[in-house]
Image (cartoon, grey):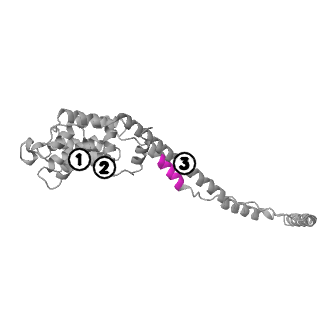
Amino acid sequence: MKNFETIDRYLRGKMAAAEQEDFEQALANDTELKHEYLLQRSEEEALERLAIKKRIQTLQQQQAASQQKPAVKKLMPRNFLPGILLSVLLVAIVIWVLNTLSEKPVFNKNSNSTKTDTLKTTIKPSSSDSLRKDTIQEQRNQTSPSPPIAMVEKYYNTTFNTDPEISLKSGGTEPGDSPLEAAYQALTDKKYTKVIQLAQPFTQDSIWNTSALELVGHARFQQKNFSQATAAFAQLDQKKDPFYGQKWQWYLLLSYAAQLPTTKTAFESTARQIEADTEHPFYLKMRELRAELRKSGY
């Protein structure tokens, strides 16, 4: 892959902020680069899982080896062998005589206790519980669904392309007087990094705060940086604007949906707020989206 080193640096977090933003913009616009990125990321994850599996196997082998007692071999001189055999024979004869006289087996009690002791020493609680838990957690992570980004983007694009108006008059002047006109144009031109650079300074303590937040929210969403898009639309949602508030709430819901299943609690909470208002302009769209998500296992 021709972009291997660039993608590798991005995956390992070794890019500067500006370079990372440029790469994310290219990732959003270049289909071939996006395909290489997804392929390389999946290969990295597969290698990590293989390394973990090998580590678990190595630890289990080490543990099994530590529990085995090495056999001790003693070499005895041949001169001692006849004497040892004779001693064993005498002991056996004495035991047989005693058993015959008392009519009770001498070794019953001792043999039982010996068996019990043997069982106690051989049956030990496993110390690999943590390894099994790690393996189970890894399997769960592998089977957990990926965020439904493509599905959510379909709803987002339908809304944005149908009603792309942004609150141009938030500063109380005509649209042409807005200092954010360049940012609006950059959003139209799909230059999302530039949108953020131009709009971000106005997101704090400015009469253009509302417009700036909305521009940043849309730019972040288009870059697939859904956590930052959520932060922007959440601030807008808190304003409870009578004209644009319901649309911002819908974009906030879509930002949560793009991060499922991680943001399931926040998604359901926002969905219930929209569902409580049957006159909400996005009431039907919300129900359609939630039904489609549930059908897909979210």
**Left/right of residue 149 with respect to residue 200 in the rendered view:** right
Residue behind mark 2: 18
Q: CA distance from mark 3 to mark 2?
A: 37 Å
| Main secondary structure type of the part rendered in magenta | helix
Residue sitting at 47 percent across and 41 percent down?
Answer: 43
Residue behind mark 1: 196
Residue sitting at 8 percent across and 41 percent down?
Answer: 176
Task: Give whichever of 109, 84 is nearer the camera.
Answer: 84
Is 126 included in the stretch rendered in magenta?
no
Q: Is residue 183 above or below residue 61?
A: above
Task: Give whichever of 145, 90 is nearer the camera.
Answer: 145
Q: Is residue 179 above or below residue 87?
A: above
Q: Is residue 71 above or below residue 148?
A: below
Residue 161's image quarter?
Answer: top left
Q: Which residues are magenta?
A: 130-138
Q: CA distance from mark 1 to mark 3?
A: 42 Å
Q: CA distance from mark 2 to mark 1?
A: 11 Å
**Which numbered disc, 1 or 3, marks the residue that appears first in the sequence?**
3
Q: Quadrant of the N terminus?
A: top left
**Which numbered disc, 2 or 1, marks the residue that appears first in the sequence?**
2
